[in-house]
Image: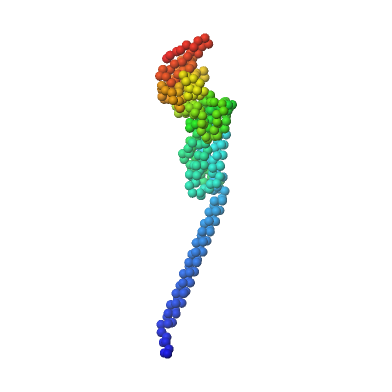
Amino acid sequence: MAKKKKSRFAPLAMLASLGSGINLLKNSGLKLCLLLGGLLFIWLAVSIKHDVRSDARFLLANWHLQPGRLPAWVTPEIRSRIMEDFSLGKSDLSLFDQGVLGSLKEALEQSHWIREVLDIRLVYPTPQAEGAVRAAMVLSTPVAMVRVGPNCYLSDSRGRRLGEPYKASARSWFNVPIIEGARSGIAVPKPGYPWRSPAVVDGLSVAAKLGRARISEDYPENPIESIDISNARGRVDRSKSEIVLRSGQLRLEWGRAATSGAHRVLTDAKKIANLRTVLTEPHYWRLTDLTLHTPRITGRVRSDSEEAESRY
């Protein structure tokens, strides 16, 4: 058998093969370096993120709330309650959490004292000062106090109880009427929850209308001190006014309750107009049982010997 003749190009092929191997090693080494570099970068990023997130300066639990100027009726106790509610809501938050502003807004609005957060901003920490959360808020403004037993409970225009029980003497501080005549033994809701008693809801509805009309601000010397709901829905006497307001010696008949099925003569806006007339014109002040719910205001002259009907 003839011996196979060696190709003169064999050495070149071997060199080419060796070069390919060297290039392969170089490429593999480069890839390995890139992989190790990427892993190192990820490790450093995670480590830095962990260190930053654990830094007390960036934990919002250590930041304080700057609520801006609060209404005059806000007591130190109410302010403290708002701060406490906010602290509980932000305890797990960090400055670097995604959507942190939205989370802070939700944390604030968890307090039943806060009706709405209009704007929220962060004041970043410095070596001289801690971080802060600035918030512009609308509070749940009290419109009345509901008396149940010996206690009175602040409530807002949406019919929700606010805060802890108060004594009746707190009425003048909050400048709201006391809703009287609620049935004994009715369920008192927890703070932030609505009243279920229809009569109380009717009384709060009237109180909210007085609040929107700014009656207490416009007539500070003749405040509406109480709203009597004992005859709501004609519970005592269907022929009498279901809601009665009291201002000093004045007894002012509002007429039907909001949830009453009985016929109404005047709209609430016209009743408010009649109320303004009574509180403005002194010659009404010697009368009582003044009818706010009729086109023409009527009342009784207060007298020890007689109760004569008088019309104006």
The x, y position of residue 59, in whole percent, is 55, 47
Residue at (49% x, 36% y) in the render: 115
Residue at (51% x, 18% y) in the render: 249
Quarter of the image with the N terminus is: bottom left
The x, y position of residue 222, in whole percent, is 49, 21
Q: Residue furthest right?
A: 150
> Looking at the picture, does residue 18 appear above or below residue 245?
below
Q: Residue furthest bottom?
A: 1
Residue at (57% x, 29% y) in the render: 166
Residue at (55% x, 53% y) in the render: 50
How many numbered marks appear? Answer: 0
Decide if residue 134 is in sight here: no
Quarter of the image with the C terminus is: top left
The x, y position of residue 42, in whole percent, is 51, 59
Closer to the camera, 241 or 276? 241
The x, y position of residue 277, in whole percent, is 43, 20
Decide if residue 11 is in sight here: yes
Q: Quadrant of residue 78?
A: top right
Which colour assignment does the render follow?
Answer: rainbow
